[in-house]
Amino acid sequence: MTRSKINLAIVEDDKQIQSILINYFKRDEINFDAVNAYSSIEEVLTVVDNLDNFIFLLDINLQGMSGIDGIFHIKNKWSLCEIIMISVLGDSNSIFKSICAGASGYLDKDTPLGKIKEAVIALSEGGSPITPAIARKVFDYFQPSKNLTENLTKRERDVVQGLVEGLSYKLIASKLDISIDTVRKYIRSIYNKLHVNSKGELLAIYRQIP
Amino acid sequence: MNKLAGFFIMAFFISHLNAQHLQHWGEKEGLSYRIVNYCLRTSDGFLWLATGKGLCRFDGYEFLPIGKSKKWDISNNLITQVLESEKGVLWVASDNGISIINLNSNEITDVFRHTAAENSLSDNYVLQIYQTPDRTIWVCTADGIFHKYLGNGRFRRYYNSTAKDRRFGNRPLMIAFQNHIWLKSQDRGVYKIEPVSGKIVQRYLTNPTSIDEGGFTIIPRYGLLCMTKEGVKVYHVRENKFKTLQIKNIKDIYKIVPDKKGDWWVAAYGRKRLFHYSNETIKDVSGYLSDYSQNTQINMISPGQGNDLWLCTNSGLYKFIVENPLFTSILRKDQFEKPLYVSSFRGFMQDSAGDIFMGGYGGLFKLNEKHQVKQLFDNIIYYSPNVLIDENKKYLWVVSEGFGMFKVDKKEGKIIKQPKDKDKYNYLIAGIRDTGTIFLLGGYDELVWYNSATNNYRDLHLKYNGIIFSRPFVKFIYKDKNKFIWICTHFGIFVLDPTHNIIARYYDAAPDGYRIPVNKVNHILEDKKGNIWVSTEGGGACKIDLKNHKITVINTEKGLADNTVASILEDSSGMIWVATYNGLSVIEPVNNQINNFYDEDGLSDNEFNSASCLYTSNGSLFFGGINGVNICKGYKVLQNKIESGNKIIISDIEMLGDNNEIEHIHNLQQLRKDLKLSYKYSYLEVSFFNTDFSHSERNIFYYKMEGLNDNWIPLEKKNSIRFASLSPGKYILHIRGKSSKNNLDAEEAVLRIEVQQIFYKTWWFALISIICIASIFAGLANSKVQQVNELAALRAKISSDLHDDVGSVLTRVAMQAEIIEEEVSTKHQEVMKSIVNSCRMAMSNMRDVIWSTDSHYRNVGNLFDKITEMVQQTMEYSPISYKLIFEPELYELEISQFQKQEIFFIIKEAFHNIVKHATGNLAELRVFKVKNEIIFIVYNNGPVEEKVSHTGMGTMNMIMRSKRINASLIFDTSEGFLIKLVVKLKRTYFSW
């Protein structure tokens, strides 16, 4: 099956990094179609075009509205888009918040460009990056005793447990006797469930924002 | 030989005119001035005295001058009269106007004097303040005008419209009678005035002159009496005129005052003589007045609340106790024409014919049914007929002190002496007939059986429990209905069974059931219920319940008149009569109520003699004392004697205050409040009195101080109590008391006292100290926290700046280098890769540093997350598998930022070393807790490729870092590569 080209939206307030990313992704015409760049959430929200099929590379620290807060508005406007957060510090709390808000993955800013591209492509194919720290938060979040709208399946729990233990996707796949892609899909499913469970809270929070 | 005097003495002489028990107070006793013009008992319980120099308050014990305040001073005023217009408000009439005194505070609240205003007093010399039943206050001034008080210091003056000078005469005095004001003066007679208009209705006695301020009196049955020089005039309502009332043998009457019983007390003859007028019998009691001064003049007569009578004179204050003759007394000293020593009575006996024989010191008397007394013989000196024992119709045995035992002819009084055995057995005090001719007699030194048939004496030795009582001093012997003999001695009571064996002894050290308060016993009585009542000398009366072996003591604490009991009788209604050395008590066994009677109640004297009593066949009780014989028909006669209780009032508090000066609190308002004392006070003395003034000297008191003692402590007759240096705390002082008349408690007085704690021991000081110390600590902590927060904020800023500035730059450089790397030739690709790697590494290191300085996440879980990410990155391209095992309960533990930082870099270095040097295929990090330590173990299962030197830079770094956090670091390469880091967990309140 031929994968369709990826539409990318880069939200980065550092002009030079923005420029580097744009040039880098635009050069790959095979995988990427539109590559748009914005400097702030506010600028994004002024776009009238439909960005539903875009993947956003969203910096957490932006001038104006933060990237985390921007997730809600972006998803509200274009519910089908996907968002990958980029963070210099890799603060797991912020990352977890982003994921709960609707992000589908995150990357460190010092991730090589090639890895960034891989992650974007992997996301477009259904995968979601996750670290053990995030996995632990996910594990704590999805406790059986909690009255959640969506709870994890046993398999999903096993995947999270493996991640908490620091196993690589490969090792998890090997341990659970599934493929790496399946692992990625499970992670994606876990993220979606995070989105669903936290959606109500987020709506309540963001409705208060003028 | 004594001659028998055969004469009849008049029957009983009812005496109620002897105003005995006189008390006097003058300046020596504390009265502020000897001339007392007026006295008044007010609602606060005190007696207020109007003197020639100021006003005095009296509590039965002490005088307190009242009348000085900041604004006014009446201490030198001639006070003519006082009136309590309403509860707590005292009007004081003087030669300098009227003062109003608040009885609670003793403060003068107002003064009314003559001014130019028409609605003021017309003169400052106020003779009289009078309150009519409608509560209107009227005032008479010396200028001959009278006034009506309108309120607010205003007066309406009433002038004599019929006189040129508009006066009613010299020194007018008034009274209200039959809805009119009656006014009399020294020179213008009597006016009858309509009170509303002030119009003179009629004038009477136009030519009289009164005696000073003799004034008016209203006496029931007579009506209005007016004192004049021509005698007492009584107003005849029908005839509308005054007529002379004849009071025989008394002239120059100044005052007539009726008392509660309706008797009159009359001051006459220049006010120097006092008469008691009752049932047309007059007694001159003036003699008592001259005891203190030959020139005593009576200013006022005031009957008290009981049978006390108060006289205000110009030589002080007198109190008389007027007799209330409830008893009959005969054979008193004053009834004998010649002095005899016969009045102190001992033995009594009533024979079958109903004749009563009475033995007095030196004589023997016989009283027949008609109460005619015949003296059988006298002139026997040093002879006391202590016991009289009936022989038969003709003879009487007399047990005497001085003449032993002898027989007397009842009719003639002839003494038939019995010979004595060896001159012994002369001093006999007690005796009984045992059987037939056998008597048991006792005296100072002996206890002896006497056979009158053979005239033989046989000693009876008292021996009990191995003790011989050789000189028993026998006071009384009694044979009970069960024929047990009770021998009362100075060593207690010995009981003999009918076979004359001693079977019991009652004494002060005996076991329960046999223990009496003291050993000296004067008399016993067997009551109708079979109880034995014991008269002791100093221990009160005891009731021995023989069935239950229980002894009840009744003494002065319970209201008995005195603790030395002479004898006890039971009347027909079951009341127990206890004759003591100081009064007669009657006990109601049902409720233990006690009423006491004294000389003022008709007793010839308060002192009774041991075992001198008789209950006659017609229900009379005879008690012999040191002054004749007292007779009473029984308690029913005395039933109206029971009086209700009075109050105990605290009159003064004296204390040594902070400034070492004695302070007094006199006014009732302050005395009713709680007393707060500083911890510095040295002593506190509280004085009090019983509102029964009739016998202040007999009132007894008890106190209990809650907070100090739980029991009631008797004060006897002392009316004050002193406490020295009470410890800080709260106390409640209770004072109870009884008057001498009965054992009903007067209403208790209560005083709450708080002795304040020294300030540094008080709760508020402790609280303030704690708050201050806590504030200091909080301040310090806050300061520290602030410092910490500032430091954290600085770090956060540095982190943020690093992230924003340096991080961005590094990212740019790395990204650009990556792009260039793809575009340059292979030769330069390595260089560019190196640049990229350097940038990424710089960013990574920077991230690590920023993380390590971030103060927000101090829990171990955060450390684990970071270690996990680091290990993932470090081991990503290594063939060595890794395993990270963290104990779950460690995640929430807190460690210091510094510890977090150093531990992270040690583990990071350890994994870098594994990647560089280890040859095994598995790297493991295990973290767990043991007691108060967290243990980090990094292990690789393969031998180390090169010999790892512990002096290498990386290793040195690790060692240095471990020392910084006081952790121990162990290297072990014996089996693979192992590092053990042990970190102590400390509780820190201020961790930074």
Image (tube, coloured by chain):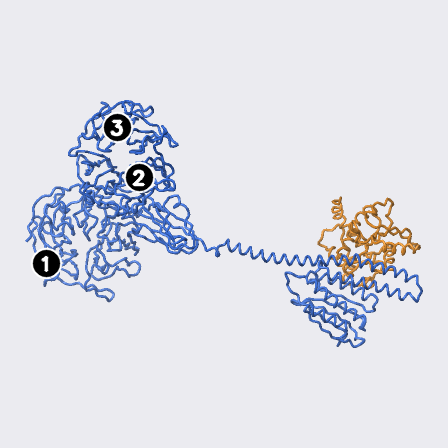
Q: Nearer the viewer, residue A114 or B444?
A: A114
Task: In the rendered structure, find residue B691 and report the number of the disc placed on it.
Answer: none
* Chain B: drawing colour: blue
Name the kind of residue labelled 1 in the image. Answer: Ala
Q: Nearer the viewer, residue B754 or B144?
A: B144
Q: Are marks 2 and 1 on the same chain?
A: yes
Q: In terms of secondary structure, where does tag 2 sit? A: loop
Q: CA distance from mark 2 to mark 1?
A: 84 Å
Q: As drawn, is B963 to the left or to the right of B404?
A: right
Protein chain holding label 1? B
Whether B125 is drawn above or below B587: the answer is: above
Residue ID for mark 3: B169
| Image quadrant assignment for residue B447 | bottom left
Q: Write down which chain is painted orange.
A: A
Image marks 1 and 3: residues in contact by CB distance under 8 Å: no
Whether B270 is drawn above or below B595: the answer is: above
Give the mark nearest the N terminus, 1 or 3. Answer: 3
Where does the image place residue A137, in percent across and percent down from the top left?
A: 75, 57
Residue ID for mark 1: B453
Q: Nearer the viewer, residue B107 or B361?
A: B107
Where does the image place residue B428, in percent across and percent down from the top left?
A: 15, 58
Give the mark nearest the N terminus, 2 or 3. Answer: 2
Name the kind of residue labelled 3 in the image. Answer: Gly
Of the two numbered discs 1 and 3 in the rendering, the one whose residue sits closer to the viewer: 3
Whether B799 is drawn above or below B576: the answer is: below
Task: Please tell me how many numbered marks the rendered image carries.
Answer: 3
Where does the image place residue B541, in percent across and percent down from the top left?
A: 26, 53
Q: As drawn, is A18 to the left or to the right of B309?
A: right
Residue ID for mark 2: B77
Where does the image place residue B372, in percent across and percent down from the top left?
A: 12, 43
